[in-house]
């Protein structure tokens, strides 16, 4: 099982509420629409908590750097090969193009991050 983690920052002209509305509804619907085409087994959105003060206190307690982002998207795939090969079909390429075009409507891609990982469950 392979997972893609996207740490996202909203476009500066959007309020947090506008960002969430687009992400949770329009964008989530696109992911659901193309999940089979792109080989996505699971999709989870994690939204930042409302209190930046609590976040700052917790990172300070651990001597960590506070990072201001708006959410995390996690996408699970059966394998890296399935993830990559799905893009090589016409249907997959078109799906990915539509998803990326939508991301540009609400995510500041230059300030967001992506990370590929394999899960190791401890508990």
Image (spheres, rainbow, N blue to C red):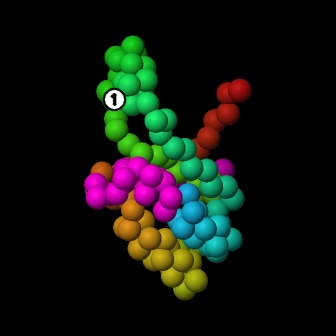
Q: Residue at x 57, y 63 (%)?
A: 25
Q: Is residue 52 magenta?
A: no
Q: Position of residue 51 (x, y in %)?
A: 43, 30
> In this view, which residue lies farthest toward the top?
61
Query: What span is in magenta?
Result: 1-23
Q: Position of residue 40 (x, y in %)?
A: 64, 62
Q: Position of residue 118 (x, y in %)?
A: 58, 44
> In this view, which residue lies farthest toward the bottom?
90
Q: Which residue is mark 1?
A: 66
Nearer to us in this view, 5 or 105? 105
Residue 82 visible from this viewpoint? no
Q: Residue at x 54, y 67 (%)?
A: 26
Nearer to us in this view, 122 or 73? 73
Q: Residue at x 67, y 33 (%)?
A: 121
Quadrant assignment, res 119? top right
For the C terminus, give its image quadrant: top right
Q: Is residue 109 above or below residue 34?
A: above
Residue 51 visible from this viewpoint? yes
Q: Residue at x 34, y 38 (%)?
A: 68
Nearer to us in this view, 116 or 107? 107
Nearer to us in this view, 119 or 29? 29
């Amino acid at each position: 099982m392979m997972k893609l983690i996207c740490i996202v920052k909203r476009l500066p002209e959007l309020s947090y509420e506008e960002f969430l509305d687009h992400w949770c509804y329009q964008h989530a619907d696109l992911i659901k629409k193309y999940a089979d085409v792109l080989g996505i087994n699971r999709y989870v959105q994690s939204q930042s908590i409302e209190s930046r003060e609590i976040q700052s206190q917790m990172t300070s307690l651990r001597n960590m750097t506070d990072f201001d982002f708006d959410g995390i998207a996690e996408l699970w795939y059966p394998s890296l090969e399935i993830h990559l090969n799905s893009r090589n079909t016409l249907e997959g390429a078109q799906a990915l193009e539509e998803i990326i075009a939508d991301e540009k409507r609400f995510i500041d891609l230059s300030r967001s991050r992506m990370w590929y990982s394999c899960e190791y469950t401890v508990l």
